[in-house]
Image (cartoon, rainbow, N blue to C red):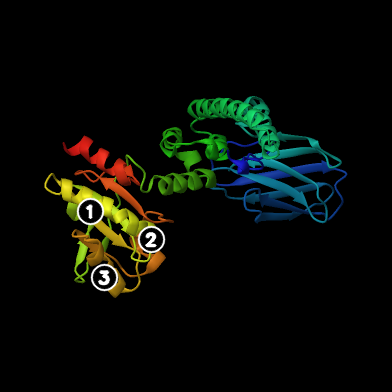
């Protein structure tokens, strides 16, 4: 269950089609105090991107946006604010400062698209958020299981609906925002990537698409089914060894350390696997998170680890461990002869059975 879902799905009122190089936002609000400071603030990071001073209720902003953004129009010295999604176009706001909810937005070619999205999505978003709130305080296991089942049903529906929206409006910046908003609901980063790949160039320029792209790239690192990222570290004789040099063989990349008791307890299983399958196109590459070379070498000898070992002797800052986001050891990944990761964290009998399936 994702507790951080609450608050991630932000409320929005409108948005704009981006198609030119800059935006112009003109406002005319009755009852807005004269000389009031007006700010355009990025709704995600809270940074002010533009300012203006109102004269007789009128103000204007000009600037450039990557591909559209969710912004907050706020007024100095007050908590009053209006959220809007704008792009590089001419937009007009009109209404009464004392009734911001009734302010009308004109000039947004995709406003109708967003209204359709909001009408479909917001009720489900609210249901999910309410379920999460109740679940956080529910101690009865039967009721919790029931609510979790309901949560998963709604979650699947939201993913489907937003996926359909993105595919129907692949050129809209709102599609990038919508996908960003629900991205934590995906259990599989590859499923998220499939929808993300529907986006066309304009929404890909938005900060939401850029954050999604980085999240997808990071999430795929070390994932089963992806290509193993190459790295080079020195072996026990200070000679550089590349992971890619093992292409053509099944290789178990084993992250461990001499000071790690669970690693040392698992080592006999790795020794058994190595001795059983080393003549059947299989080997092991040990990557140590040690920082004392003598301790590292002594552990290799004591545990009978007769395969190739590498380390940069940087403890948890080991570059290969950092590359693969290793936060706990023992950890391993099984790489096939083509360099693709086909399994993660195989231990004990699971390692033996997986190798039997592949090599016998």
Relative image position of residue 194 (x, y in whole percent):
41, 33
Question: What label sits on residue 199 in the rendered view?
Answer: none
Judged left or right of residue 254, residue 99 is right
Say which residue appears at 64% left-offset and 28% top-offset. Answer: 142
Question: What label sits on residue 271 in the rendered view?
Answer: 1
Judged left or right of residue 15, residue 81 is right
N-terminal label among 1 and 2:
2
Q: Can you name the residue that lies furthest to the left here?
A: 279
The answer to whether one can see residue 249 in this image is no
Secondary structure at badge 3 equals helix
Judging depth in this view, the residue of 225 and 124 nearest the camera is: 225
Say which residue appears at 17% left-offset and 50% top-offset. Answer: 275
N-terminal label among 1 and 3:
1
Quarter of the image holding residue 17?
A: top right
The answer to whether one can see residue 299 in this image is yes
Q: Is residue 28 above or below residue 114?
A: below
**Total numbered circles:** 3
Which quarter of the image is occupied by the C terminus?
top left
Question: What label sits on residue 261 in the rendered view?
Answer: 2
Mark 3: few/some/many CA within 10 Å (<14, 14-19, 20+):
few
Tag 1 near tag 3, CB within 8 Å:
no
Secondary structure at badge 1 equals helix
Quarter of the image holding residue 128?
A: top right
Mark pair 1, 3: CA separation? 16 Å
Judging depth in this view, the residue of 110 and 220 nearest the camera is: 220
Say which residue appears at 18% left-offset and 60% top-offset. Answer: 306
Relative image position of residue 282 (x, y in whole percent):
17, 47
Relative image position of residue 112 (x, y in whole percent):
64, 27
Say which residue label 3 marks. Answer: 298
Judged left or right of residue 233, residue 20 is right
């Amino acid at each position: 269950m994702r507790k951080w879902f609450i608050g991630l799905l932000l409320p929005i009122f409108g948005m704009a089609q981006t198609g030119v190089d800059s935006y112009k936002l003109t406002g005319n609000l009755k009852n807005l105090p004269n000389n009031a400071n007006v700010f355009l603030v990025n709704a995600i990071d809270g940074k002010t991107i533009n300012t203006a001073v109102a004269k007789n209720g009128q103000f204007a902003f000009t600037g450039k946006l990557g591909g559209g953004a969710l912004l907050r129009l706020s007024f100095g010295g007050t908590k009053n604010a209006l959220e809007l999604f704008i792009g590089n176009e001419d937009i007009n706001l009109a209404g009464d400062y004392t009734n911001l909810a009734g302010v009308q937005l004109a000039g947004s070619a995709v406003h109708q698209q967003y209204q359709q999205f909001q009408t479909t999505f917001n009720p489900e978003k609210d249901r999910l958020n309410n379920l999460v709130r109740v679940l956080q305080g529910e101690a009865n296991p039967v009721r919790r299981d029931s609510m979790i089942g309901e949560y998963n049903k709604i979650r699947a529906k939201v993913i489907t609906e937003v996926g359909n929206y993105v595919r129907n409006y692949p050129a809209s910046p709102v599609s990038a925002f919508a996908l960003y908003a629900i991205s934590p609901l995906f259990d599989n980063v590859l499923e998220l990537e499939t929808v993300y790949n529907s986006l066309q160039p304009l929404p890909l320029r938005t900060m939401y698409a850029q954050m999604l792209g980085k999240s997808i790239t990071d999430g795929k690192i070390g994932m089963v089914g992806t290509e193993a990222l190459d790295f080079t570290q020195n072996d026990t004789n200070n000679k550089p060894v590349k992971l890619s040099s093992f292409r053509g063989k099944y290789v178990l990349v084993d992250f461990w350390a001499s000071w790690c008791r669970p690693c040392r307890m698992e080592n006999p299983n790795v020794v058994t696997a190595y001795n059983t399958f080393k003549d059947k196109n299989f080997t092991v590459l040990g990557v140590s998170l040690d920082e004392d070379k003598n301790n590292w070498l002594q552990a290799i000898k004591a545990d009978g680890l007769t395969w190739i070992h590498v380390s940069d002797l940087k403890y948890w800052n080991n570059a290969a461990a950092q590359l693969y986001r290793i936060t706990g050891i023992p950890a391993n990944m099984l790489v096939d002869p083509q360099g693709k990761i086909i399994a993660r964290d195989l231990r004990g009998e699971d390692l033996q059975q997986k190798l039997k399936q592949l090599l016998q």
